[in-house]
Image: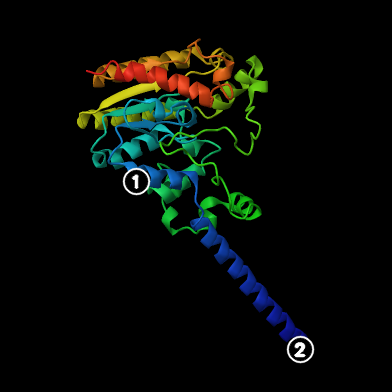
Amino acid sequence: MKNQIINIIVKIFFISIFIGAFFAYCEYRLYNTTFRLDHKKNNFENKIDSIQVLVLGSSHSLYGINPDFFPIKGYNLAMVSQSLYYDKEIVVKYIEKMPSLQYVLIEISYFSLWYEVYRSEENWRDKYYFKYWEINPNNSEFDNLKNKSGIEMFGINFTQNAIRKNFKIYFSDNKPTENGWFNPAGLPWNPDNTFFKDSMNEEAGKLAIEKHNKVMHDELFDANKSYLDEILFSIKKKQLIPVIVTLPVYKSYSNNADIEKIKLINKTVFDLCAKYDCKYYNFFYDNNFNSDDFIDNDHLSPSGAEKFSKQISIKIFNNRN
């Protein structure tokens, strides 16, 4: 009986050591895994002295604005689901450190004024901005994030997925280009570069709008308007040129958008542009972009990004004082 108890204790001891070592390994790998945000931050900071045009926004800008087609050096600092709060925090954090900066392009999408990361299914992104950019989320749930473990920070589901993929997650070979623009061609979910063109129809556009409507909350409008105001104030204070832009979407998306929301976007942006003397270029209903210019209902393809970047470049830089 005594030997059995000793054997049980020994087994428990070694199992505990194994579990402890496994959790320590997970913590180590989570904190040393390179993500797209981390790569982008390092690349951006290495070029910060020479950047003349800074692009902000969500995936619409990330895929849709390629600074290669600007006449001066630009960098795309947009990111998937990036909200105006993070655009504002990035501007405040870096604008004083950018001696060559002349222009800041701010994307306003259909959902921007009613959206915040922590109120969406992508609330885990708050943790990345905190970890890699040292930006505190505007969500009280993460007030004590610094004291949390990596597993607690990223969550069980994310950690399990990371383990299954040997921590090669979210960012591997699919790096943004040297100017921050991200080419979606050849992504793992799109190996043949067909994207989602088979779903670019009226029904799919309606579903895409409905998806965005679900993350748009009326109570967030005032805060987002304030963030946009702060961005413009910071830019003008430095005597730089702010430009607000709404990118093209496919007709199946724009046809299903809430007209009242569109009117409010236009009024809000035009009012702020009048206050801060800035330009607003709205391509939401632009019919010059066809199905070949998109990867899905609301994101430009690489060729669409080239087309749009050239057009917006002409409007911005040919009209400069």
| 41 displayed left or right of 20 | left
Q: Quadrant of the C terminus?
A: top left
When the figure is inspected, residue 69 is found, relative to residue 155, above or below; the finding is above
Alpha carbon of mark 2 to alpha carbon of mark 1: how far?
Answer: 63 Å
* Position of residue 319 in the picture relative to residue 222 (left or right): left
* Of the pair 43 and 258, the residue shown nearer to us: 43
Residue annotated with mark 1: 46
* Residue type indicated by callout 2: Asn
In-front residue for pair 177/3? 177
Point out residue 295 in the picture as x, y percentages from the top left corner. Answer: 58, 25
Residue farthest along the bottom direction in this orientation: 2
| Classed neighbour count for the residue bearing mark 2: other residues with Cα under 10 Å, few (<14), some (14–19), many (≥20) | few
Residue at position x 26%, y 39% from top? 98
**Type of amino acid under label 1:** Asn
Q: Quadrant of residue 65?
A: top left
Q: Earlier in the sequence, mark 2 or mark 1?
A: 2
Q: Position of residue 31 (x, y in %)?
A: 49, 57
Labels in figure, total: 2
- Describe the element under mark 1 as helix, strand or loop: helix
For mark 2, give the secondary structure: helix
Could you tell me which residue is drawn at 36 percent across and 26 percent down? 70
* Residue 237 point in image, percent of width and height: 20, 31
* Residue 220 picture quarter: top left
Q: Quadrant of the N terminus?
A: bottom right
Residue receiving disc 2: 3
Question: Which residue shows up at 64% across the image and 16% down it?
Answer: 201
**Disc 1 residue crowd, few under 14, some 14–19, many 20+, Cα 10 Å:** few
